[in-house]
Amino acid sequence: MADKDNKPSKETLEEWSKNPDNWILGIFYFNRKDKRIFPPKRIAQFGWTVNFANPISVLAIVAIIVATILITKLRK
């Protein structure tokens, strides 16, 4: 179910996270319907993951990795 703003309900978001069809090899979340950049992992207590179906998510994770590498190189 979606509300007026066309946002999925909390129940829908939970269903997407729990649906094994949205997980490649059980660890990579891939759901084109889910517009969240960092959705919760299958077990929400373990934090968040990247939605590889969302191009912004992929760019965000690449930016984080590049920033980490640059900071590491600059500190040496």
Image (tube, grey):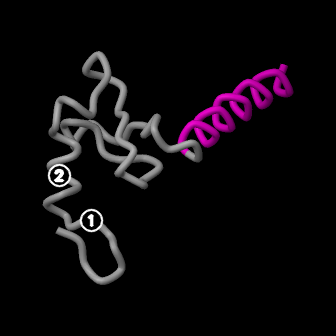
Residue 75 or 35: which is nearer the viewer?
A: 35
Q: Name the quadrant containing residue 66.
A: top right
Nearer the viewer's eye, disc 1 or disc 2? Answer: 1
Where residue 18 appears, as percent x and y from the top left, is 15, 39
Give neighbour class at mark 2: few <14, some 14-19, many 20+ (Cα, 10 Å): some
Do tag 1 and tag 2 residues touch (Cβ < 8 Å)? no
Q: Amino acid at mark 2?
A: Glu
Tag on residue 8? Answer: 1
Q: Residue 7, percent across and down?
A: 32, 70
Residue toward you, 40 or 55: 55
Which of the numbered marks, if any, corresponds to residue 14?
A: 2
Q: Write down the region rendered in magenta.
A: 57-76
Q: Residue at x 28, y 38 (%)?
A: 41
Tell me the SS state at disc 2.
helix
In this picture, residue 21 sits left or right of residue 51: left
Q: Nearer the viewer, residue 27 or 44?
A: 27
Marks 1 and 2 sit apart, C-alpha to C-alpha, by 10 Å
